[in-house]
Amino acid sequence: MTTLQLNEEVLRNISIIADDESMLRRVAKYLRKLIAEKQDSSDSMTQEELQAKIEQADIDFRQGKTFAMLPGESFMDFRKRIGR
C-alpha cells in the first residue's frame, strides 16, 4: 500500500466512526501514543551526524587515540579502565 492509499483508508475509517464520540476518543488516545513513539524515535542521529562521528573516529584512530580490551576483560571493566 502506498502512503496515499493508507491516508485514504485512515480517513475513510475515521469518517465511519465520526459520529461516535467514544470511538473518536479511543482513536485520539492511540494517535497521541503513536506521536509520542515517533518523537522518541526522532532522537536518533541524522545521516550527517552519523557520517561526522565516523569521520572523527577515523581521525582519532589514525592519530593513535584508540583503546583495546585486554584478554578476558569484561566490557564494564574496560569502561572503568578507560574512564568512561
Image (cartoon, rainbow, N blue to C red):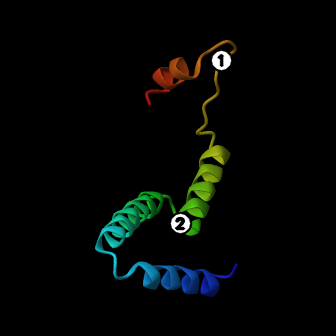
Residue where numbered disc 1 is placed? 70
- Quadrant of the image occupied by residue 54: bottom right
Q: Nearer the viewer, residue 61 or 77?
A: 77
Query: Left or right: where does residue 15 sit relative to residue 32?
Result: right
Q: Position of residue 77 (x, y in %)?
A: 52, 17
Inspect the image, locate mark 2, and give the three-letter code of the amino acid beneath it: Thr
Residue at 34 percent across and 82 percent down: it is: 19
Residue at 59 percent across and 67 percent down: it is: 47
Q: State which quarter of the image contains the N terminus.
A: bottom right
Residue where numbered disc 2 is placed? 46
> Mark 2 to mark 1: distance in Å?
33 Å
Relative vertical location of residue 81 with respect to residue 9 in this rendering, above or below: above
Q: Which mark is residue 11?
A: none
Q: Position of residue 68 (x, y in %)?
A: 64, 27
Query: Left or right: where does residue 49 sit relative to residue 35?
Result: right
Disc 1 residue crowd, few under 14, some 14–19, many 20+, Cα 10 Å: few
Query: SS of the residue at dot 1?
Result: loop
| Disc 2 versus disc 1: nearer the observer | 2
Disc 2 residue crowd, few under 14, some 14–19, many 20+, Cα 10 Å: few
Q: Nearer the viewer, residue 44 or 31?
A: 31
